[in-house]
Amino acid sequence: MPTLATNKRARFDYEILDSLEVGIVLTGQEVKAAKTGQAKLQGAFVHIRNDEAWLKNASITRYKHSGASEDYDPTQSRKLLMHKREIKKWLKKMEGERLTIVPISLYTKAGKIKLEIGIGRGKREFEKRDTIKKRDLDREVRTRKYVSR
């Protein structure tokens, strides 16, 4: 299950409460470009409209060996493959608690490209500072253990 792209800011900017694996509709050249590492999830989000989930602002650049296609938009909206009951469940969660859906990682599984999405609450500035502080302390403890051996 090789990871093709990750959204490193997702877990830093949001407290992820629940996650889900979904399929994504891609064209052939987008699949090839994603498998060669030309996909980026930074700044992307999931929008639900008319009982359909869409991935917005994810960038998959044009595959360099594909034919000339001037009308290709790398940040176009891409449909996510979710069951209606999952969409309704996540919509209900979002409305009640002011949550958002963010993509976490893009990976392959059994020859298919899957997207892990998470529903999360945005962190405040002081929570982000606490996260940085904890990460630095953990790093310092790990280096002390390694040096003392």
Image (tube, helix red, strand yellow):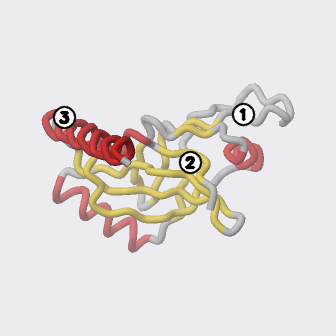
Q: Note whether 21 is above or below 70 in the view shown.
A: below
Report which residue position mark 2 lands on.
78
Of all residues, the one furthest to the front in this rendering is 149
For the point 17% across and 56% down, the residue is: 97
* Nearest to N terminus: mark 3 or mark 2: 2
Q: Note whether 67 is above or below 122 in the view shown.
A: above
**Quadrant in the rendering for residue 123:** top left
Q: Answer left or right for 129 relative to 82.
A: left
Report which residue position mark 3 lands on.
129
**Quadrant in the rendering for residue 132:** top left
Residue 119, how many percent across, how many down? 32, 56
Return the mark for residue 62. 1
Q: Between 90 and 118, which is closer to the camera in this rendering?
A: 118
Q: Between 77 and 100, which is closer to the camera in this rendering?
A: 100
Mark 3 vs mark 2, foreground winner is 3
Mark 1: few/some/many CA within 10 Å (<14, 14-19, 20+) = many
Q: Tell me how far mark 3 sits from mark 1, CA to CA.
A: 37 Å
